[in-house]
Amino acid sequence: MKRIIKRAILVIAVLLVCCLIGFFVWTQQTYEPTKELLKSVGNIEHEDDWVTFKPSGTNKEVGVILYPGAKVEPKAYGYLGKRLSDAGYTVGIPKFNLNLAMLEVNKAEEWINRNPSIKKWFIGGHSLGGVSAATFAHKNPKLIKGVILLASYPASGDNFSNKGTPILSIYAEKDGLTTRDKIEETKNLLSSDTVLFEIKGGNHAQFGMYGEQKGDNQADISAKEQQDLIADEMIKWLDKQ
């Protein structure tokens, strides 16, 4: 009997190790920025494990933190970062352990502490990165002025409906992962001060510039077109806050 128990424990331990190794390998198979993005943006600056974009002209002293989607490299959101910095906003896009924002929800604190001259902070994210960004904002209402959800929504425990937090929710018509139905189902978690914007013909992967993504639908517009629509809406909304 003891021998059977020992063998069972050994089998369970081996299976657990295999699962952990498989999970680690999965997290390292990341979505990298496209050549189109790298050509459009040019030199991308880093500060430790942050991709950074700072205004070269007028500085509005307003910061925007963007959490990448699961397994997406921070540089893949470089076009949005560049557009926002050209409009006067300071942008930080972090790289997370195992490339998953949910493992380091409070990562935003690093960038906030490094930039004491910033007077107002906004946080946002793409897909699961947006879920984690919303969690940070919900926990830190005195730090964060508003939330930007890109093909994303708050977790059920982060209910903004009784808060006055400004929220911008941008979603796409052809998104095969964060579907219109999911956006509709989670509207009750958003604040009364929410702006909803649908990108006609857009899909999930083109909220960044990293190529195709499994489970997504084909977009009717180019990645560049979708990125410009997202950036335009973000800047318009931020300018009003």
Image (cartoon, rainbow, N blue to C red):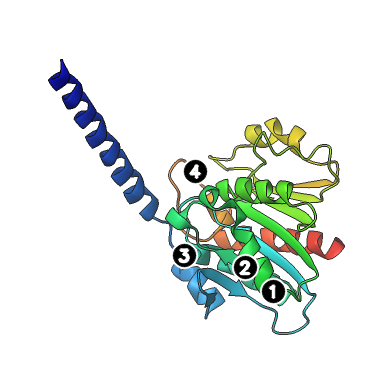
Q: Are marks 2 and 3 in contact (CB under 8 Å)?
A: no
Does 69 sit above or below residue 116? Answer: above
Residue highlighted by disc 1: 115
Earlier in the chain: of badge 1 and badge 4, it is 1
Under tag 4, what secondary structure? loop
Determine crowd level at label 1: few under 14, some 14-19, many 20+ residues with C-alpha closer than 10 A: few
**Residue mark closest to the camera, 4 vs 2:** 2
> Which of the two labelled residues, at mark 2 and mark 1, occupies the earlier sequence position?
2
Task: State the image coordinates of residue 203 (x, y, percent, origin top left).
Answer: 57, 48
Q: Position of residue 231 (x, y in %)?
A: 69, 63
Quadrant where the N terminus lies? Answer: top left
Q: In this view, which residue lies farthest toward the top?
A: 1
For badge 3, the amino acid type reads: Pro
Q: 207 or 128: nearer the eye?
A: 128
Tell me the element at label 2.
strand
The residue tagged with tag 1: helix, strand or loop?
loop
Image quadrant occupied by the C terminus: bottom right
What residue is disc 4 on?
A: 216
In contact (CB < 8 Å): disc 4 and disc 2: no
Badge 2: few (under 14), some or many (20 or more) residues near its Cα, within 10 Å?
A: many
Q: Of the residues tagged 1 and 3, which is closer to the observer? A: 1
Q: Amino acid at mark 2?
A: Gly
Give how far apart the Cα atoms at labels 1 and 4 are: 36 Å
| Towards the viewer: 220 or 122 | 122
Whether residue 94 appears in this view of the structure is: yes
Contact, mark 2 vs mark 1 (Cβ under 8 Å): yes
Whichever of labels 3 and 4 marks the residue nearer the N terminus, that label is: 3
- Which numbered marker is on residue 92? 2
Q: Upstream in the sequence, badge 2 or badge 3?
A: 3
Query: What's the distance in space between the residues labelled 1 and 3, CA to CA?
Result: 26 Å
Q: Which residue is mark 3?
A: 33
